C-alpha cells in the first residue's frame, strides 16, 4: 500500500539533515482510509485520534473549572498557595525519585522523573515558572491553547498547573472536574516508600485507603516510559513507544530489546545460549505468531505499517510504524511513534521523519512485519 501524491502534498516540509524533529501534519483521514481494517497502523491511528481528543478535552475541562472559580480567591493568595505547594511537592518527590531508581517499575521512575526533572527542570518547576510570570487569572486563561505549536511539553505543564490550581480551589468550593479528566497515569508506589502523603497535594499522591496503596497520579500528554496504559479511559493515560506498537499489533507487550531478539531469532543470528534464553521468554516466543523478520537494506524494502526498531549500541531504543517514504531523501521515511525527548521539545503520539540506518552507526535497525 503506497501513499498517494495527495497525501504528500498535505505534509509540511522543512530542510532536513539526519532526521527532523519537526512535527508533521498528515491527512490522517486519507491515511486511515488507505489502511486495511486489520492493519496495525489503522489501530495506531485510531488510538492517536482518541488521545488527541482526550488531551484537548482535559485541557478544556481544567480551563473551564478554573474559569468558573477564578475569582473565588484573591489572585495573589491563590498564586502564593499553589506556588508553595509546587515547591513542597518538588522537595518531597525528589528523594522519592532517587529511591525509585532502584526499582524495576519504569513507569513510576518515568513519572517521577517528569515531575521533578532528571537532567533538566521538571513539570513542577516549569509550572512554578509560568505561575510566577502570570499577573492575573485572565492572563493564565489566555495562555491556554488547544494545540501548542512549540514545545509539546507545554501542554503537560499547563495541565498540571491547572490541576494544582483547581485542587486548591476545591478547598473553597467543590466542582465536578476530576471525573472528566481522561489522560491520567497512575503509577503504584511500593509499600513503605512514602509514609502517609507527607502533605503532598492530592493532585500528586492519591491514597487508596480501600486497597491500602498509594498511587502517584498526574495528568500528561500520553507518553510514560514503561507505561502500558494505551487505551484512553479514566486512569489509563500513558504508554511508551513499544507498548503502543505492541498493543496495535495485538502482540505480547515487548520492549525494544525483546523486539530485537525476535528479529535475530527469526534471522538465525542468535547463539545457542541466546536461543535457550529466548525460548524461556514466553512473551517473545508468543510474538513469533505476530511478526515476520524483514531484511530491509533501505526504505524501498519497507511496507506501510511495518514496525521499525532502533537499538542504540550504548543501550536503549525506540520503535514506531512506517507510514511512507520521504519524497526526496531515499534514506528518510515518515513514522508514527509515541515518544518524549529529554529536552521536552517532543511528547506524545506524532508523525516524524526518521532515518532507517543512522549514518553515524550509533544504532542498529530491525524491521518486523505484522502477520
Image: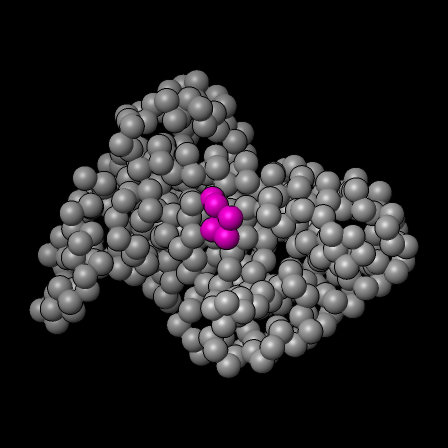
Does 220 appear above or below 14?
Answer: below
Image quarter for residue 124? Answer: bottom right
The residue lying toward the viewer, choosing from 217 and 134, is 217
> Magenta includes 329?
no
Image quarter for residue 164? Answer: bottom right
Q: Pinpoint residue 342: horizontal percent, then vertical percent.
A: 54, 59
Q: Pinpoint residue 275: horizontal percent, then vertical percent.
A: 12, 65
Does 279 appear above or below 290?
Answer: below
Residue at the image position 72 percent from the left and 65 percent from the top? 86
Residue at the image position 42 percent from the left and 48 percent from the top? 230
The residue lying toward the viewer, choosing from 350 and 334, is 350
Q: Which quadrant is home to the C terminus?
A: top left
Let me know if residue 17 appears in the view: no
Q: Pinpoint residue 337: horizontal percent, then vertical percent.
A: 42, 44
Residue at the image position 49 percent from the left and 72 percent from the top? 212
Residue at the image position 13 percent from the left and 64 percent from the top? 279
Q: Which residues are magenta?
A: 232-237
Give the residue furthest to the front. Answer: 210
Does 84 appear above or below 288?
Answer: below
221 on left or right of 89: left
Let me know if residue 24 appears in the view: yes
296 on left or right of 109: left
Predominant SS of the magenta segment: strand
Q: Which quadrant is home to the N terminus?
A: top left
Amino acid at each position: 500500500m503506497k501513499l498517494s501524491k495527495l497525501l504528500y502534498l498535505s505534509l509540511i516540509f522543512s530542510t532536513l539533515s539526519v532526521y527532523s524533529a519537526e512535527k508533521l501534519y498528515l491527512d490522517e483521514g486519507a491515511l486511515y482510509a488507505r489502511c486495511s481494517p486489520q492493519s496495525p497502523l489503522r489501530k495506531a491511528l485510531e488510538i492517536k485520534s482518541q488521545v488527541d481528543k482526550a488531551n484537548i478535552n482535559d485541557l478544556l475541562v481544567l480551563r473551564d473549572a478554573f474559569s468558573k472559580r477564578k475569582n473565588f480567591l484573591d489572585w495573589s493568595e491563590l498564586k502564593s498557595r499553589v506556588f508553595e505547594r509546587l515547591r513542597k511537592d518538588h522537595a518531597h518527590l525528589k528523594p522519592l525519585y532517587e529511591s525509585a531508581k532502584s526499582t524495576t517499575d519504569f513507569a513510576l521512575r518515568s513519572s517521577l522523573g517528569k515531575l521533578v526533572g532528571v537532567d533538566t527542570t521538571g513539570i513542577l518547576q516549569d509550572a512554578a515558572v509560568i505561575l510566577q510570570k502570570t499577573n492575573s487569572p485572565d492572563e493564565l486563561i489566555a495562555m491556554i491553547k488547544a494545540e501548542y505549536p512549540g514545545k509539546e511539553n507545554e501542554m503537560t505543564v499547563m495541565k498540571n498547573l491547572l490541576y494544582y490550581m483547581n485542587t486548591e480551589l476545591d478547598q473553597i468550593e467543590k466542582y465536578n472536574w476530576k471525573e472528566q479528566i481522561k489522560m491520567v497515569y497512575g503509577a503504584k508506589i511500593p509499600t513503605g516508600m512514602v509514609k502517609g502523603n507527607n502533605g503532598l497535594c492530592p493532585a500528586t499522591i492519591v491514597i487508596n485507603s480501600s486497597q491500602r496503596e498509594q498511587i502517584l497520579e498526574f495528568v500528561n500528554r500520553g507518553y510514560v516510559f514503561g507505561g502500558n496504559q494505551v487505551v484512553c479511559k479514566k486512569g489509563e493515560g500513558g504508554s511508551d513507544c513499544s507498548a503502543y506498537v505492541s498493543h496495535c499489533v495485538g502482540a505480547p507487550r515487548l520492549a525494544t530489546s525483546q523486539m530485537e531478539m525476535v528479529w535475530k531469532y527469526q534471522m538465525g543470528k542468535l547463539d545457542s545460549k541466546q536461543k535457550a534464553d529466548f525460548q524461556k521468554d514466553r512473551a517473545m516466543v508468543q510474538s513469533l505468531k505476530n511478526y515476520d523478520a524483514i531484511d530491509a537494506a533501505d526504505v524501498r524494502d519497507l511496507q506501510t505499517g511495518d514496525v521499525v526498531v532502533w537499538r542504540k549500541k550504548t543501550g536503549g531504543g525506540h520503535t514506531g510504524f512506517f507510514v511512507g517514504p520521504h519524497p526526496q531523501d531515499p534514506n528518510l521515511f515518515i513514522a508514527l511513534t509515541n515518544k518524549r525527548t529529554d529536552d521536552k521539545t517532543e511528547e506524545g503520539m506524532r508523525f516524524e521523519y526518521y532515518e532507517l540506518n543512522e549514518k553515524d552507526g550509533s544504532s542498529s535497525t530491525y524491521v518486523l512485519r505484522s502477520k
